[in-house]
Image (tube, rainbow, N blue to C red):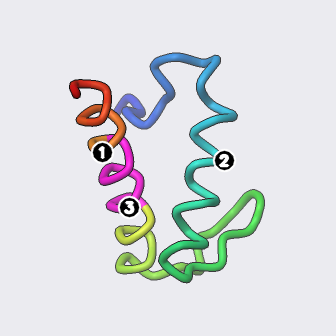
């Protein structure tokens, strides 16, 4: 099965990683560089959910 979690715009990878670290800090999840397989689904979901929330907020701000 093909991987679907690749970055569509490779130039954005560094910015997305920075956003992930900031989101993790905001929700109180301790992310390390590299492997984070020790995190629970809830912790990973809270980081991803916070990232989506920020992206939607940014898009909505751009519509104003």
Answer with left or right where residue 38 lies relative to residue 54: right
Classify mark 1: helix, strand or loop.
helix
Residue 57 or residue 40, whichever sits in front: 57
- The label number, if any, that marks residue 18 in the structure image: 2
Query: Whole-percent x and y of residue 41?
Result: 38, 76
- What segment carries the magenta color? 48-55
Residue 3 numbered mark, or none: none
Q: Nearer the viewer, mark 1 or mark 3?
A: 1
Asked whether 49 falls inside the magenta stretch, the response is yes
What residue did someone put label 3 on? 50
Sequence-wise, the earlier of marks 1 and 3 is: 3
At 50% from the left edge and 27% from the top edge, which residue is drawn?
7
Query: 1 above or below 17?
Result: above
Locate residue 33: give its quadrant: bottom right
In percent of the image, x 63 and y 68: which residue is there? 36
Q: What's the CA distance linking mark 3 and mark 2?
A: 13 Å
Q: Residues within 10 Å of mark 2 (few under 14, many from 20)?
A: few
Q: Residue furthest front?
A: 64
User: Where 57 sits versus 40, above or below?
Assistant: above
| Quadrant of residue 1 within the rendered picture | top left
Residue picked out by circle 1: 57
Closer to the camera in the image, 39 or 58: 58
Closer to us: mark 2 or mark 1? 1
């Amino acid at each position: 099965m093909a991987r679907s979690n690749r970055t569509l715009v490779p130039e954005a990878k560094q910015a997305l990683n920075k956003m992930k670290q900031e989101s993790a800090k905001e929700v109180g999840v301790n992310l390390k560089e590299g492997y984070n397989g020790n995190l629970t689904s809830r912790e990973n979901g809270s980081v991803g959910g916070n990232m989506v929330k920020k992206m939607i907020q940014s898009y909505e701000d751009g519509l104003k």
